[in-house]
Image: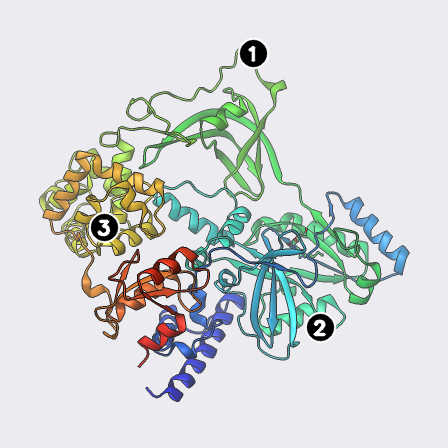
Amino acid sequence: MEAEAARERIKQLSAELDEHDHRYYVLAAPTISDFEFDKLLKELETLEKAWPRFASPNSPTQRVGGAVSKDFPLVMHRYPMLSLSNSYNREEVAEFVARVEKEIGATTYVTELKYDGVAISLTYENGELVRGVTRGDGEKGDDITGNVRTVRSIPLKLRGDFPERFEARGEILFMREQFERLNAERARNGEEPYANPRNTAAGSLKQQDPRDVAKRRLDNFIYTLQGEELPTRSHFENMLAARAWGFKTPDPARRFIERTTDVEGIMAFIAYWDKARHELEMDIDGVVVKVDDLRIQEELGNTAKSPRWAIAFKFQAEQAVTRLNDVTYQVGRTGAVTPVAELEPVLLAGTTVKRASLHNADQVAKLDLHFGDHVLVEKGGEIIPKIIGVDLTKRSMGASPVVFPTVCPECGTALVRYEGEAQHYCPNEHACPPQITGRIEHFVGRKMMNIDGLGGETVGLLVREGLIANVADLYDLSRDQLLGLGKGWGEKSADLVINGIAASRATPFEQVLFALGIRHVGETVAKKLARSVGSMDKLMGLGQAELVAIDEVGAVIAQSVVDFFAVEGNRRIVERLRQKGVQMEVDPSMVRKVGDKLKGLTFVVSGVFRNFSRDGIKEAIEQHGGKVSGSISSRTAYLLAGSDMGPAKRAKAEALNVKIVDEDDFMRMIEE
Ligand code: IVH
């Protein structure tokens, strides 16, 4: 394709994809299917790879994650980011109104939701997002622009008539659905669920690889504009304007934002949301009352920390008292033992609560729980209710304390607790029933071996019937054995399972590795290991130190891999899987070849790049026939230096006469 044609097509695709993002993530009214969207995105990705000089940092392709950052630079806020003064009862809100009116007379107020997330300041210049900064200490915050770009409801380019330069401020948060999806995925990987959406959103935004942030599927609401040339002097009108530019702002039609001129209007809004908040798709922790007129806001001014023209009314975290009937213990596929409080059912925040997680032995000890206790259950930002205290006055004489078991409640093996971990584990990996079924269930899962027709229930049945005891046994199952299971097992369902198992042998190696259920080896780590090591044989031969040398593999993961393969039983299972034809190495045809401009050249990559993530640039080298190595030697052809490269690397390259090239040089090397 000619350069001019490529540039045009990139521009056109970008605009089209931006529009679809807006329709999907802001308006919730998509007009094309995910499939069609992905097709357009793929086309753009391919074009940008071939023509990197036409790729913009605000391209829709950056939504899935651009360059990795080491540290987030600290930047000054142009306008300080204040916080709101809080009130917990309606009287204080009435006092606020009285104070305002005494000072400036009758005025209009805006009431809106107080989102429970992480504050963000977004700077736009000429309609393009140029910076996203956290609140920090209010004066300066972290520049997390690359991560912010992955939040799909934040527009990268604006539409309509916007000021040349301004800041949009708002809250980055999890919609409940996405938070639950994330936790379900963690559960499938044998990881602890995250306790609360707000902290998880904050943690997500601090990740160094934007691709990881993109996977979290965060959302955003804008709640204020800052700038010298805002469209109107009304906060409410400005929010409507921002909506027209493409931002996700509070929807008046859903009463997310309202204008009122008196205390009654404010109280009605509070009363409405005190109830309705439980049905919302995200968490709010209160409502905010603001003076609408920006000039009056200015007149009222700020105290040291918060504006005098606004107040937050915070909802009480919902609590209820109920009886602790029992404590049960769940054993997960990794052997982790989690205590669960079995409660007398109680209505809390709109749902009936029967159980609450007690997390671990420390938590049980801290609460000093006794059977039959009256416990205080709270559902705040968390999805899973928690027990925050015990009413000691109601404890009956002779109540027996809850004692954490010393043996596995499922198989009787003595529990162990690893150094530095709060969780107890049952070490009887190969004979503890829930661990056996849990591991097999994990193995057959969609993102692992993806075996059709095998769900949790069927796996449980097969284990109970003694037909399988580990994942390798699946490949010895016969059709007749399944037909012999009796009720519900016709030819059709048996064939489905047998064919599904047979087909799973083609599953790519990285998924096989994930499917094995090695502790701490989730989807991403498995991919990483598979791609950098290449085969099961090589992986099994690596020691702790060699594993740690792999990018993004830490000591804990490395040890866990070593421990896994040190177990004879695990090695035997891997061997049997290999004999059954399961993939044990990376399929070389999966590494897409683009060209061979870099054939015979070995690169060492260091630092941070503008247009590539660290992995992305390595992939680009390999796609053009080059090799990537971890350390500089006389065989290294080029040191590819990004920003922030350490001086030691540079010195070594110079000492060995290795040529140092930057990202632009590299682009030229692979272009045309
Ligand atoms: S206005 C000068 N409006 O609450 C105050 N803040 O303690 C500017 N928040 O850090 C903030 N929803 O992150 C405002 N509708 C809303 C809000 C909101 C949530 C957060 C914000 C701020 C904190 C204030």
On-image quarter of the C terminus: bottom left
- The residue closer to the viewer here, 651 or 307, is 651
Local packing at callout 3 (Cα closer than 10 Å; few below 14, some 14-19, many 20+) is: many
Classify residue 559 by image quadrant. top left
On-image quarter of the N terminus: bottom left
Say which residue label 3 marks: 512
In the image, taking residue 346 as reference, residue 563 lies left or right, namely left
Q: Is residue 382 visible?
A: yes
Say which of marks 2 and 1 sits in front.
Answer: 2
Establish whether ligand 1 lies closer than 8 Å to the Cβ of label 3. Answer: no
Three-letter residue code for mark 1: Met
Three-letter residue code for mark 2: Leu
Across and down, in percent, residue 171 comes to 60, 57
* Disc 3/disc 2 C-alpha distance (Å): 55 Å
* Disc 1/disc 3 C-alpha distance (Å): 55 Å
Classify residue 481 by image quadrant. top left
Q: Is residue 450 visible?
A: no
Across and down, in percent, residue 655 comes to 34, 60
Say which residue label 1 marks: 397
- The residue closer to the viewer here, 469 or 258, is 469
In the rendered view, tell whether residue 32 sits above or below residue 514.
Answer: below
Residue 230 — which label?
A: 2
The residue under the point 12% across, 40% down is: 484
Three-letter residue code for mark 3: Val
